[in-house]
Amino acid sequence: MSNLGVWEDAEPGVRRCILNANGSLMMMEVHFTKGAEGYQHQHPHQQMSYCLRGSFTFTIDNEQTTVTQGQSINIPPNALHGVIALEEDSALLDVFTPIREDLLKL
């Protein structure tokens, strides 16, 4: 069964919902409480993250960047990256190519 449209706990204070996955693109909304962390990880997928609300500190290959509402950031394939929410009720829209089959339950 697919988990499209289903909100899931990802990490403490982090919930995600895969909005669409078709062909080579996948879109996911991710909500964070203040101080919640998307732990450092890497994957072979290209990722772009758009800040829907709040603000975040992204760490990409040991370089930190702050992203606020309306801004976006590119995460290259295989880059070690993580994120910390700086405000309560912060949210990201993440887009991946190719789709993250590791997150998509078919």
Image: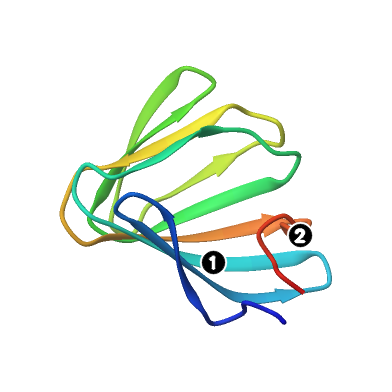
- Among the 4 quarters of the image, the one containing residue 45: top right
Instruction: Work out which residue is located at the far top of the displayed protein and give it.
Output: 62
Q: Specify the quadrant that holds the N terminus.
A: bottom right
Q: Position of residue 68 (x, y in %)?
A: 28, 49
Q: Specify the quadrant that holds the C terminus.
A: bottom right
Q: Position of residue 28 (x, y in %)?
A: 54, 66
How would you rate the neighbour count of disc 1 (Cα within 10 Å): few for under 14, some for 14-19, many for 20 or more? some
The kind of secondary structure element at disc 1 is: strand
Marks 2 and 1, how far apart at CA: 13 Å
Type of residue at label 1? Answer: Met
Q: Position of residue 58 (x, y in %)?
A: 40, 35
Type of residue at label 2? Answer: Glu
Query: In the image, what residue occupies the spot 63% across and 29% down?
Result: 79
Read off the residue under disc 1.
28
Query: In the image, what residue occupies the spot 57% across and 51% down?
Result: 48
| Residue 101, numbered circle | 2
Query: In the image, what residue occupies the spot 38% across and 24% down?
Result: 64
| Residue 83, numbered circle | none
- Among the 4 quarters of the image, the one containing residue 83: top left
Quick check: 54 above or below 79?
below
Colour treatment of the image: rainbow
| Drawn side of residue 66 relative to residue 89, left or right | right
The kind of secondary structure element at disc 2 is: loop
Q: Position of residue 37 (x, y in %)?
A: 34, 41
